Amino acid sequence: MTPLPVWIAGWQIGCCGDDHVATVGEPWAEVLLLVPDTMAELLSGEPGWVAKGAGEIRFIGRVRSTRIPGPMVLDLGPCRLGLSGPQGEMRRWTQLDERLVEGVGQVHADWHTGFDPRLDADVLVEGIVSGISVAKQVLRRTEDRFAFVGHTTPEVVEEMPLSPRMAVDVLLELDVPND
């Protein structure tokens, strides 16, 4: 079983992290979203993922619709992830419905999303937390604002911080059963 790296934004934890505490060695379940950097149709392959480093995964999965109209999900075999990204991508994902795809991206826990675990239970991913790290956000100043450009190297911590500073995100390693 390859651990699934899951990013949690510091602002989310500061907002309502008490309801989503993660502890190493304990079960944890959340709605998880894949933000793909790349995604292209694939003719054959086995669904799954490999951790690529820096909190990214290389994945193979099948795009599926949930509700009509509704969000799209990526079926990775052991789990399904909601697809998240710019609005323009939804049209492309709809065209890939029921097709096998491959790509690279990051998985995010997001309890402020449009996915509803009661209606879209298949995007509620359950597993055992095998590691917790924190990473500071790297920001670059543009003309009128700061833009997120990445993270520092994650540092292992003993427990999930419940009140991180805004520029600190959490990276969980989640062991997802292969049922």
Image (spheres, grey):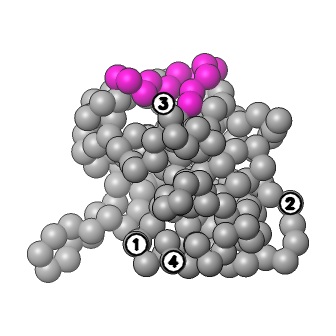
> Badge 1 local density, few (<14 within 10 Å), some, or many (20+)?
few
Q: In the image, what residue occupies the spot 52% across and 40% down?
A: 119
Q: Magenta includes 59?
A: no
- Asked if the residues shown at circle 3 and circle 2 are in contact, with their CB atoms under 8 angstroms apart, the answer is no
Q: Identify the magenta region.
A: 18-29
Q: Amino acid at mark 2?
A: Glu
Q: Check disc 2 and report its element: helix, strand or loop.
A: loop
Mark 3–mark 1 Cα distance, whole angstroms, equals 35 Å
Mark 3–mark 4 Cα distance, whole angstroms, equals 40 Å
Q: Amino acid at mark 3?
A: Val
Q: Magenta includes 23?
A: yes
In the image: residue 4, left or right of residue 14:
right
Instruction: Tell me which label, 3 or 4, sits earlier in the chain.
Output: 4
Q: In the image, what residue occupies the spot 27% across and 68% down?
A: 147
In the image: residue 74, left or right of residue 113:
right
Number of the front mark, 3 or 1:
1
Instruction: Tell me which label, 2 or 4, sits earlier in the chain.
Output: 2
Quadrant containing the C terminus is top right
Of residues 80 and 35, the one nearer the viewer is 80
Mark 2–mark 1 Cα distance, whole angstroms, equals 28 Å
**Residue 129, x across and y down, in percent:** 61, 29
In the rendering, which numbered label is found on residue 87? 1
Q: In the image, what residue occupies the spot 76% across and 43% down?
A: 78
Of residues 66 and 79, the one nearer the viewer is 66
Quadrant containing the N terminus is top right
Instruction: Tell me which label, 3 or 2, sits earlier in the chain.
Output: 2
Q: Check disc 3 and report its element: helix, strand or loop.
A: loop
